[in-house]
């Protein structure tokens, strides 16, 4: 009786195994050829048939398990688990086809756990896999070379072991030991054969990897063809999307500027600049989103991962630099400590802020050339309204009088150097910041300038010193000035007794001239002295010279 039950159990087990194999094959066929079915009803009928057959087979197997021998229970139990797994799979497929495109996994428990390491590793996995693929052949070659090196060491060790065993066999006379040593020799011989076989296999694999049946031209052509059809096309699409987005945003910005063309630019300047920078930021954001979208649609996980890492790096960099960006944004919007058309002091010179940008432009109207400073340098400055203040103490072509009473003409002004020319044409170069600190008289900045001179006569003319002498000098100097090219520039002549000196009566002579006569400053100054000497000669007025009194001390009573 027991033998009959065992036979029946064995037959049923074989039948169930064949059924499970067929159902697995059928399931695989369904998965592979799922698109071959035109109607979902046909698929549902097939699955329903498989489910019913599976249920029937499971019921029969359970009946067999109840009366089976204990030695067969483990194998029958594994078969039952296989049937249950297939049944679950068929039922899940049936449900998925019945509900259509609805994702049934959404109805399960929501996993709220988050591990940033896992998320980052998922993003980095395509990059690592592509890098591994690029280095796959070199890594295999290196591994095989390591295997060959290790194999050589093993062969040396095996040879040494066999040599040692043979020595022991020659010296030992015990039959039992001889038998054991013979068996040991066989073991080590097998090891040597395995090592030799492993070496031969590694050599074959290494030769196969190092052998190249394809020419380098064909390799390059195939690689380029694959790149153009794959990743190259993806990159081209990304570039096209970026260019299209850029042109669209530029067009919108142009329309915005055209609409605001007739508005008050002074009032509109801040809003205009804010709109410009907002458009630039929006353009960059849209371009980044467009590029990532192209990579996602094309399914290029490597480029997608790289672009997301680049976006994350940009976000982290922005987070660290937000305070600096806020200050710079205020300056760019003309709301910071430095504002356009105002006056700043840089490198010892005043400058007008022409424009604020990533490379801001500073200009001094009196100097030839401009300065372009990065925004980081502008941040540390403070500007103020310029008003009608002069931008520099001299202009090109001005005549200046230095402390030593030398007359110089300004011939060139640059942000670095000021060039001055004397009467003989010699050029003196002075650093622009140093020239700004100099104390000198600019004869061309005002409407007029004056020439002051001092002249003294002898005390014996004291009686006529207050009236006659000034009048005669005034008439003579005026007549002398009328003979020069600057006669029309003379505005006023003043001659007054200035002081009664130690040896002369000193007169203060001051001639006021128009600034057009600045070039003749030194010549006119000499002419005034010459005229005074001429008048003294004509009027027989004595011109004194300093007297030195020598006093002799009486030392007889010392």
Image (tube, helix red, strand yellow):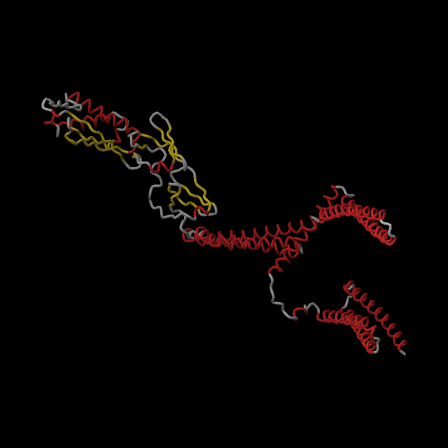
The quarter in which the N terminus is drawn is bottom right
Q: Would residue 103 be found to the left or right of residue 450 on screen? A: right
Total residue callouts: 0
**Residue 301 percent location from the top left of the image:** 66, 55
Where is 209 relative to 541, above or below? Answer: below
Where is 548 relative to 310, above or below? Answer: above
**Residue 181 percent location from the top left of the image:** 84, 51
Q: Would residue 82 be found to the left or right of residue 490 on screen? A: right
Viewer-closest of 17 and 432? 17
Asked which quadrant contains residue 346, the reply is top left
Q: Would residue 285 be found to the left or right of residue 63 on screen? A: left
Q: Would residue 69 be found to the left or right of residue 451 on screen? A: right
The residue depicted at 85 percent of the width and 68 percent of the height is 18
Viewer-closest of 420 and 283? 420
**Residue 331 percent location from the top left of the image:** 44, 51
The quarter in which the C terminus is drawn is top left
The residue depicted at 61 percent of the width and 59 percent of the height is 117
Viewer-closest of 245 and 383? 383
């Amino acid at each position: 009786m027991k033998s009959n039950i065992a036979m029946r159990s064995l037959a049923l087990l074989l039948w169930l195994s064949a059924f499970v194999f067929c159902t697995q094959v059928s399931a695989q066929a369904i998965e592979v050829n799922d698109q071959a079915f035109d109607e979902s009803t046909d698929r549902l009928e097939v699955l329903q048939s498989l489910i019913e057959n599976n249920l029937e087979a499971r019921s029969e197997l359970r009946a067999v398990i109840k009366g089976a021998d204990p030695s067969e229970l483990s194998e029958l139990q594994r078969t039952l688990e296989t049937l249950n797994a297939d049944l679950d799979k068929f039922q899940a497929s049936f449900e998925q086809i019945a509900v259509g495109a609805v994702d049934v996994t959404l109805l399960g428990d929501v996993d709220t756990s988050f591990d940033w390491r896992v998320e980052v590793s998922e993003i980095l996995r395509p990059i690592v896999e592509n890098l591994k693929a690029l280095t796959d052949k070199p890594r295999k070659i290196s591994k095989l070379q390591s295997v060959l090196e290790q194999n050589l060491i093993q062969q040396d060790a095996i040879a040494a072991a066999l040599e040692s065993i043979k020595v022991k066999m020659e010296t030992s006379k015990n039959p039992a030991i001889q038998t054991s040593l013979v068996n040991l020799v066989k073991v080590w011989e097998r090891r040597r054969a395995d090592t030799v076989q492993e070496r031969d296999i590694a050599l074959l694999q290494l030769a196969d990897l190092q052998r190249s049946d394809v020419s380098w031209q064909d390799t390059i052509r195939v690689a380029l063809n694959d790149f153009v059809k794959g990743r190259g096309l993806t990159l081209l699409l990304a570039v096209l999307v970026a260019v299209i987005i850029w042109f669209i945003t530029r067009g919108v910005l142009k329309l915005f500027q055209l609409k605001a063309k007739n508005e008050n630019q002074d009032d509109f300047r801040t809003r205009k600049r804010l709109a410009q920078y907002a458009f630039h930021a929006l353009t960059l954001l849209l371009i980044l989103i467009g590029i990532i979208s192209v990579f996602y649609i094309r399914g290029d996980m490597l480029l997608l991962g790289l672009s997301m890492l680049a976006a994350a790096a940009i976000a982290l960099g922005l987070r660290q630099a937000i305070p600096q960006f806020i200050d710079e944004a205020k300056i760019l919007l003309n709301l910071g400590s430095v504002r356009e058309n105002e006056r700043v002091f840089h490198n010892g010179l005043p400058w007008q802020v022409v424009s604020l940008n990533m490379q801001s432009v500073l200009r001094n109207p009196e100097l030839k050339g401009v300065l372009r400073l990065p925004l980081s340098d502008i941040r540390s400055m403070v500007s103020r309204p310029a008003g009608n203040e002069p931008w520099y103490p001299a202009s090109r072509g001005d005549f200046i009088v230095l402390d030593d009473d030398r007359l110089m003409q300004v011939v060139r002004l640059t942000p670095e150097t000021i060039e001055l020319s004397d009467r003989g044409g010699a050029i003196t170069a002075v650093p622009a910041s140093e020239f700004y600190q100099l104390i000198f008289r600019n004869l061309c900045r005002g409407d007029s300038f004056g020439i002051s001179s001092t002249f003294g006569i002898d005390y014996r003319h004291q009686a006529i010193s207050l009236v006659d002498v000034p009048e005669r000098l005034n008439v003579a100097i005026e007549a002398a000035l009328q003979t020069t090219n600057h006669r029309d520039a003379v505005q006023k002549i003043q001659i007054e007794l200035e002081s009664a000196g130690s040896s002369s009566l000193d007169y203060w002579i001051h001639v006021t001239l128009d600034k057009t006569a600045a070039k003749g400053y030194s010549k006119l100054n000499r002419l005034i002295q010459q005229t005074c000497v001429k008048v003294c000669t004509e009027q027989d007025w004595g011109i004194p010279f300093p007297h030195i009194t020598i006093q002799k001390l009486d030392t007889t009573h010392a």
